[in-house]
Image (spheres, rainbow, N blue to C red):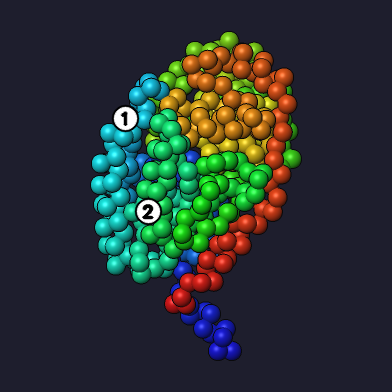
Amino acid sequence: MTGAVDEKLRRKYRILVAPLDWGLGHATRCIPVINELVSNDCEVWVAAEGSQEILLKKEFPSLSFLSLTGYRIRYSKRATWFAFKILLQVPTIIATIRTEHRWLKKMIDSFHFDAIISDNRFGLYDSNIPSVFITHQLNVKTPFGRWSERVLRKWNYKYINRFGECWIPDLPGVVNLAGQLSHPDTLPRIPARYIGILSRFEKNESTEIKDHLLILLSGPEPQRTILENKIVNEISHYAGTATIVRGLPLASSIIPSTGMIKFYNHVPAKELNEEMQHAEWVIGRSGYSTVMDIVALQKKSILIPTPGQTEQEYLAKNLLSKKTAFCVDQNEFSLTNAISQAKNFNFQFPDTGNSNQLKSTVKHFLEKLPQS
């Protein structure tokens, strides 16, 4: 009897989840994490701003949200200047890390969080309560050679090791999605766990529609708009049907649809799950969250890395070599040519194995939290 009473009196664990604001991928891959926490009777709070906040509010309208300023990184219009533009913003990134760390201290004092789960936000750790850092990018690719990658990994690990655990959204063995990004020679000093493929989508009995395209536009500006303009100019000549999701949950204006081509600023996860399974071809960036989604649903895809973004360029090359996705450079992209080439591509999807890795990881983490 006493145990049952104690269980009823125990306050739910209050967990803060905060995704990085570089595109929508960090927010979308937090969806299965949040779902797992909620299913374990946790009280989940989300820290975000802008598009990430709007997206997660639409998925989880009953959760509590805190406004947290993002890193607000701007990308270059030209691939050759991409890395230099990021380097110029390093002082701002470091200042944001310090600011969000001070912000977290105040939020813990005000709301008494039991744990923090940060998706790639370096400042959201605390020495007094358990904290998790989620990343697939332990190795950071650069155009400057391996010496720069070693320097960046050292810098990366310096921040990651301030957390209590590191969760890596990938498969643990030779068969994996992120290759060298998620499987470095040495892991961080803190406990690191591979948590499997994080996708908000599940396979069902939806019927694939021949010649139907799902085009997912995403990522930071100005490259999102550059690709959108390229797609819009070519899609009017496409003989089949297409759904184009612009990746703009904050936008009020919309590109007019036709009987064959439908435009949406944003589509909630449940509907997008159906759209993806209806599509014969999924076209989008080679961002890691998109990669996890297409592998989870085993969809044939045409992926276009953001020019100059070394992570996406590496993923595209890796996926192409493994025949997981057909990939093409943005400067060479032609809708007609890409589809024609992809039709002759021998797609091969990896065996994602045990789907309970996230469940067991979350359960193990919650079991270690102190009882309230």
The image quarter in which residue 252 lies: top left
User: Looking at the image, can residue 254 be seen?
Assistant: no
Where does label 1 land, which residue? 85
> Secondary structure beneath disc 1?
helix
Residue 255, image x and y in percent? 46, 21
Which residue is rendered at x = 27% and y = 33% of the image? 88
Is 292 situated above or below 68?
Answer: above
- Are there few (<14), some (14-19), or many (20+) residues within 10 Å of tag 2? some
> Secondary structure beneath disc 2?
helix
Tell me the kind of residue under disc 1: Lys
Depth check: 101 or 64 in front? 101
Which residue is rendered at x = 65% and y = 57% of the image? 356
User: Looking at the image, can residue 160 be seen?
Assistant: yes
Residue 297, image x and y in percent? 67, 39
The image quarter in which residue 241 lies: top right
Q: Is residue 180 left or right of residue 21?
A: right
Q: In this view, does 35 lie to the left or right of 89?
A: right
Tell me the kind of residue under disc 2: Lys
- Are there few (<14), some (14-19), or many (20+) residues within 10 Å of tag 1? some
Is 187 situated above or below 305?
Answer: below
Disc 1 versus disc 2: nearer the observer: 2
Where does label 2 land, which residue? 158
Q: How far apart are marks 1 and 2 (CA)?
A: 23 Å
Of pointers 1 and 2, the one earlier in the residue sequence: 1
